[in-house]
Amino acid sequence: MAGHHPGVPGLGDAPFNAGGRRSARPGEASEADDDDDGPTSDHGRALVLASVARDARLDKKFLLLITLSAAIATLGLLQSSAPVVIGAMLVSPLLGPIMGIGFGLATLESNLIKRSLVTMAAGMAVAILVAMVLIWLSPIRDVTPEVRARTQPTLLDLGVAVVGGIAGVYAIMRKLSGVMVGVAIATALVPPLSTIGFGLATGRFDFAVGAALLFLTNTLAIAFAATIIARFNRFGPSLTPQHTAMQVAGIVVTLGILSIPLALTLNSLAGEVRARSVVQAELRGLLGESDRVDNMNVRMERDAVAVDGVVLVDRYAAKLDTELAERIRKALDREARVSIVQLRQQTNAAVQVEEQLNRRLATLEQREEDARAILAGLTVGELVRRDRVLIDAQARRVIVQRDREAEGEQVAAAVDRIMAAVQTGYPRWLIQNGALTAAEEPEDETATETPAAE
């Protein structure tokens, strides 16, 4: 399978040059190419292939980058942080060996294919192992949205990987490093490997299988896209039209087989989206104008639709679950299991009443606190007994029952000074002398005055 690559170090028997065989019949390329160093010239193709082979090498730099990338991706998945996961994609060196596989298939160069496969296998093993170690050490092992997003690949992911592979080959041939950054972000490679490690470490083997399918989808799609574009640009030996057709047919068949589970997943997700839309529309029809949905979850469970959520309503609807389930059955022709929690929401009037009540309670609490402070101030030194102080906190009125003749001149003067000091500290209260009897009460007095508690 190895081709003849004169002067290309590492490929074939010659020192490494990665130029590949003449990619066109004798005389065609030299006549057609105007730029000897361009990607369509023999020399330009040799340089591109040498660069691809260099990026596919398994060395310390590759192992360091894949370790760092896997660590960043795993931490980003645990935190459910999309920017961190994107950072892991930028650090990842896995595009190198994948492109090496694609160009190796295009040039029929076995050495390049073997080198790329070994590098890819080592990178996968290191990334999964790093992810498992971090998961074991982490106290947080929740299934975050970023983790779940890597477990259900669809045909859309296949399309992204194919287009990304085409863009990656173009960037390599034209030496556009900025484009490779976008390709690395679009074609997620390390996050699925970290998700595989998450599934293995937590026993969620369904997550591991889904993430493995996503990684396989991205890898094959990028590699095969690189193969086709490389062949289109006349990399590798000249093949007969029959050989080229067989090569393309093999790629198409492989991607076709891979598309089957992706299509099933896409169909399932499309069904969930349609079911969610129907449920939202039917639920809105059953709720009042001021009612609103707080949260809702719609799941497809085999042949049934499971709905649960919380709605805020002005008035409780006793048959909401049964009516919604019946409407879903008619609209989707599926059984429905509905569990909706209804919470009474506050109207504007209710909110105002509650605010007024809270203010009233706060005022009463403040008056009670003032009453205790006034009582303590009046009874300081025990010149005035507690049972001789009558307090009406609601009316903010204090009456000190006194007998000035029995008190004596000096004690009476001291009590007057105490009452004056307390009155100064609480100007909104009325503190007065006197004996409160039934005959002396005003006719319109409605407040009940009770002695302060001991």
Image (cartoon, rainbow, N blue to C red):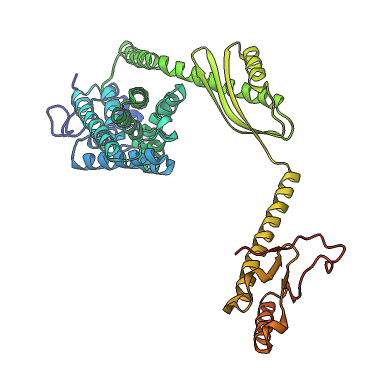
Q: Quadrant of residue 386?
A: bottom right
* Foreground of the two, 238 or 125: 125
- Answer yes or no: is residue 229 visible: no
Image location of residue 263, percent across then percent down: 46, 17
Instruction: Specify the farthest residue to the right.
Output: 443
* Foreground of the two, 7 or 283: 283
**Horizontally, is 426 left or right of 23 in the view?**
right
* Foreground of the two, 6 or 155: 155
- Answer yes or no: is residue 130 visible: yes
Instruction: Specify the farthest residue to the left.
Output: 13
**Horizontally, is 143 left or right of 317 in the view?**
left
**Horizontally, is 237 left or right of 189 in the view?**
left
Q: Considering the image in quadrants, where does the N terminus appear?
A: top left
Image location of residue 417, percent across then percent down: 67, 84
Instruction: Specify the farthest residue to the bottom.
Output: 410
Q: Quadrant of residue 250?
A: top left
Residue 47, relative to residue 246: is it above or below?
Answer: below
Residue 198, relative to residue 357: is it above or below?
Answer: above
Residue 284, relative to residue 380: is it above or below?
Answer: above
Q: Considering the image in quadrants, where does the C terminus appear?
A: bottom right
Q: Quadrant of residue 429?
A: bottom right
Taking the spot 64% from the left edge, 72% from the top edge, the residue there is 374
**Horizontally, is 276 left or right of 416 in the view?**
left
Taking the spot 27% from the left edge, 36% from the top edge, the residue there is 136
Instruction: Specify the farthest residue to the front.
Output: 406
